[in-house]
Amino acid sequence: MKKCILFFAAAVLMMFAGCASTGETAGDKAAASGSATAVTGSTINLWNFESKTTDGWYGKGKWADAVTVNENAKFAKEGKYSLKIDAKTSKGWNQDIAINDGPFPEQFQKLKAVDMDVFVPADSVKGLEYGQIFLVISGAANSWYQVPQGLKPGWNSLEYKIETDNVSGDIWHVYFVFNSGGAFAGPVYIDNVVGKY
């Protein structure tokens, strides 16, 4: 009888151990494969510029020519292209430098975060007291919802955490607002803009 109980206990333990080892998550797989980002939930590629266009981004007024497609792979985090924003002389708050009027995907209204890779040449921010890019979302739920992130020279992996209540409903515009203590001296490159929802 004692052998029967031990055998049964061993069988139950092996069954639980087998089940536990098959519970690998997508995040575990991404971490094991060396992926830079392990994401839970769903993601959507918002803008990656691989169409060799600005994906609807433009500048306004004196900044009408500031937004172009970069074709130098040195300034693209993934793929061949990125968005080049010529911020030279941009000083203080600049909401006219990069605007997108959509259309925006349906998932935009459910966003919890927006991630993007930004390359900042050291010469572009030399002498700045600070440099920032605000992600601003304008829509029915909030006409001016802004989230800031600071910049440093080199590659920046920025994550903008979003309060979903502020982006539900129609989205009218999205802005990359530049804010700085002093004048930018050159361009900034944006790539791989991904929404998490």
Image (cartoon, grey):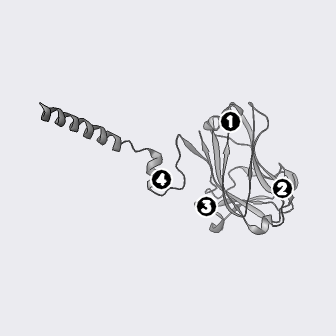
Outermost residue to the front = 2
Question: Residue under circle 2?
Answer: 180
Q: How many marks?
A: 4
Residue 145 image point, x, y percent: 76, 38
Q: CA distance from mark 4 to mark 3?
A: 19 Å
Amino acid carrying mark 1 in the image: Glu
Q: Identify whether 5 is placed above or below 128.
A: above
Residue 53 image point, x, y percent: 67, 56
Residue 115 image point, x, y percent: 64, 49
Q: CA distance from mark 2 to mark 1?
A: 25 Å
Mark nearer the N terminus (1 vs 4) = 4
- Badge 1 crowding class, 10 Å Cα cut-off, few under 14, some 14 to 19, many 20 or more, is some
Question: Residue under circle 3?
Answer: 77
Question: Residue under circle 1?
Answer: 163
Q: Are marks 3 and 2 in contact (CB under 8 Å)?
A: no
Mark nearer the N terminus (2 vs 4) = 4
SS at circle 2: strand
Viewer-side residue, 40 vs 194 = 40
Amino acid carrying mark 4 in the image: Ala
Amino acid carrying mark 3 in the image: Lys
Residue 171 image point, x, y percent: 71, 36
Q: Is residue 105 left or right of residue 6?
A: right
Mark nearer the N terminus (4 vs 3) = 4
Image quarter (top left, top right, bottom left or bottom right) of the N terminus: top left
Q: CA distance from mark 1 to mark 3?
A: 27 Å
Mark nearer the N terminus (2 vs 1) = 1
Question: Residue under circle 4?
Answer: 31
SS at circle 1: loop
Amino acid carrying mark 2 in the image: Ser
Q: Quadrant of residue 101?
A: top right
